[in-house]
Amino acid sequence: MRIHYTVLLGVAAVVASTNATLTKDVTSDHSVLGDASTSRFLRIHSATEDDEEKAFGVKSIPGVSKISNFLTSKKLAKYLKTDKDVDDVFVKLKLNAPNKNVFENPKFLRWSQYVDSLNRKNVNKEPKSMIPTLLRYYDGVQLSTMLEAATKVDSTHVVAKKLQGEQMDVTKGCQQTLRQSISCSTDIHWKREGVTADQLFSLYKLDILGDGVKNLLAKPGVNVFIRYADEFNSGERMTLFEKLQKIYSDTVLSQLLSAGMKDPKTKTLATELQTQQMNYWLDLRQPPENVFKFLALDKGAEHLLSNAQFYTWVHYLNHYNANNEITTELTLFGALKTHYSDDGIVAMLRTANPHSVRETVVKNYLENALLDKWAKAKKPVGDVVAALGDTRAYKNAVLWDYSNKIKAMGSS
């Protein structure tokens, strides 16, 4: 056993001293096979494939990973010399393992490198694509979902983006297979087949919420839809908001966008979509009372001033007033009173966050408006103080403000 260790360590030393191109990480140089001559990968004496497989098994020995990379490069160089088919190389690298995400296998980048090198070697032939091979093991939607996830990983970002473009732009063959979610052995490229953005939306089940409202925007299919609808769609041009607005009610869509805004990964997209939604409502002159309900702000007064959607509605209210001169301007207090009683307004005030600047501003405005209303109605001072004062100091402040309002009304 000691002899085998010595041999392996000796080979490791040879590999380490060989040109760095041989052992460079594939992710940092995607042209190893294309730029090096085939003989360069055969510089070290040949070994049988059985010997190579044994070497791969001794992963705990220092330098073995370099040996493994070297031997893999050597194999690929041999395959390149004989123009071995990309499908066969895929299998040789054992990338056809069932129920595995191929993009998480480091050897996938080796295979991708091989395909690029083969195409550069045979520039006069039709380029080989990785898509047909991948579709033999994954159905269209499954592959697209994995590709979208792979674009989020630094090592696979570039190749995944490239494959996304190929899948969207250049396929022949089987929309039916995409719908039925079975593997397809033919080249499927959506644009040539005439797949529309509507069909893609359904294929990714973006029109199905399941149990309860979830963060639909977090689904990988959303980004695939956006890119396809923008760059490749063979049907009528359609934005994501237009599609969502057709599928979901104002209330449900508002809830979806609200969920998306709570997730840092989808907050930007959700904010953009909500802006489009607000503009859509403004174009329709949708009353602020309706928008208040669409945003589910009528479900409870407590902590309402801490709800981000409340400020979205305030923003809408301001724009609505500014763009509808023929209607009576609706105040914030007046708009809230259409949904909540005085007790509800008090609940908002009592549950406001004293450390939030915007909540404090709104609280002061609402409290002042409520005191004006009560002063006109000549509400007993004791009831007012009991309703709004939660500390001795605050009770004194409320008493002072309310008394001044009563005096002002009496002198007018």
Image (cartoon, rainbow, N blue to C red):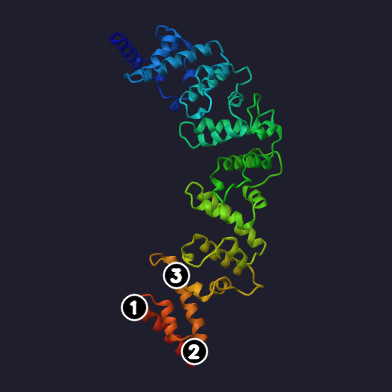
Residue carrying label 2: 409
CB of mark 3 within 8 Å of CB of mark 1?
Answer: no
Q: Secondary structure at mark 1?
A: helix
In this rendered view, identify the residue nearer to me: 193 or 158: 193
Q: Residues within 10 Å of mark 2 (few under 14, many from 20)?
A: few
- Provide the residue designation for mark 3: 361
Q: Amino acid at mark 2?
A: Met
Quadrant that contains the N terminus: top left
> Is residue 263 depicted above or below 137 in this figure?
below
* CA separation in Å, label 2 and label 3: 25 Å
From the image, tell me which residue sits under label 1: 393
Going by the numbered disc 1, the residue's amino acid type is Ala
Amino acid on which the number 3 mark rests in the picture: Val
Residue 301 left/right relative to 353? right
Other residues around mark 3 within 10 Å, as few (<14) / some (14–19) / many (≥20): few
Which secondary structure, mark 3? helix
Q: Mark 3 and mark 1: span between their CA atoms? A: 19 Å
From this view, report whether residue 266 is shown above or below residue 163: below
Q: Which circle's residue, 2 or 3, is located before the other in the chain?
A: 3
| Rendered position, 370 above or below 97 | below
Q: What is the residue that sits farthest to the left in this orientation? A: 2
Task: Give the CA separation, mark 2 to mark 1.
Answer: 25 Å
* Residue at far bottom of view: 411
Residue 221, percent from left and from top: 58, 40
